[in-house]
Image: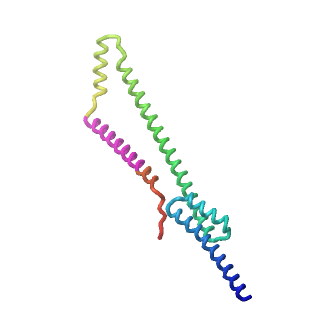
Amino acid sequence: MIRISFILALLLAGTALAADDSSKDYFDHGAENYTHDDIEKARSWVDEGLQLYPGDHSLTALKQLLEQQQQQQQQQKDKNQQSGQQGQEQKQQQDQSQNQDQQKDEQQEKAQQQPSPSQSEVGDESKTNDQQMAMSPEEAERMLDAMREKEAAERARIVEDQIRQESQKLPMVEKDW
């Protein structure tokens, strides 16, 4: 009788240990996939483990961690979409200002191409147009400086956009300290 109870106790202890090992296996697989940034596989391992071992604390904690990670990724995705929309709005504003500049240039060209009624008036008008179009060296220098600044700002914006896009491609790094 003692032997039977001893064997029965060993069998029960063995099944309890096997159950712990199994839930630990699910946790280990889930944690390994999480560390390799394969969130979907990690989630499937943890969900399957929780179906078999619903009271396991380590699986429950890992599931909470996976849910937090998913929320952070969703928030980052939302931020990226908002910044993308702001970039599109800025581009539209720039396009509109360029269109307005082109329209002004076209109007000036049309005004210059209109025929005048007499040659004497043409001569007089060309003199006044030349005088109006004449620019002092200081004015020319200011215009060139403004164009250089605008070009430098555009280049800086393009570099910032490229850096932002590259940083979005990098995986999120969690500080471990």
* Residue 67 seen in the figure: no
Tell me how many marks there are.
Answer: 0
Image location of residue 66, percent across then percent down: 58, 62
Residue drawn at x 64%, y 71% as measured from the top left: 56
Residue drawn at x 33%, y 40% as measured from the top left: 146
Start and end of the magenta stretch?
Answer: 137-162
| Magenta residue check for 148 | yes
* Residue 143 seen in the figure: yes
Image location of residue 135, percent across then percent down: 28, 31
Give the answer, above or below, for where 98 lies relative to 81: above
| Magenta residue check for 165 | no
Image location of residue 157, percent across then percent down: 40, 46
Kindly give the residue lying farthest to the bottom in the view shown: 2
| 127 left or right, relative to 170 | left
Q: Nearer the viewer, residue 24 or 114?
A: 24
The color scheme shown is rainbow
Q: Nearer the viewer, residue 16 or 118?
A: 16
Quadrant containing the N terminus is bottom right
Give the answer, above or below, for where 100 lies relative to 119: below
Q: Nearer the viewer, residue 176 or 151?
A: 176
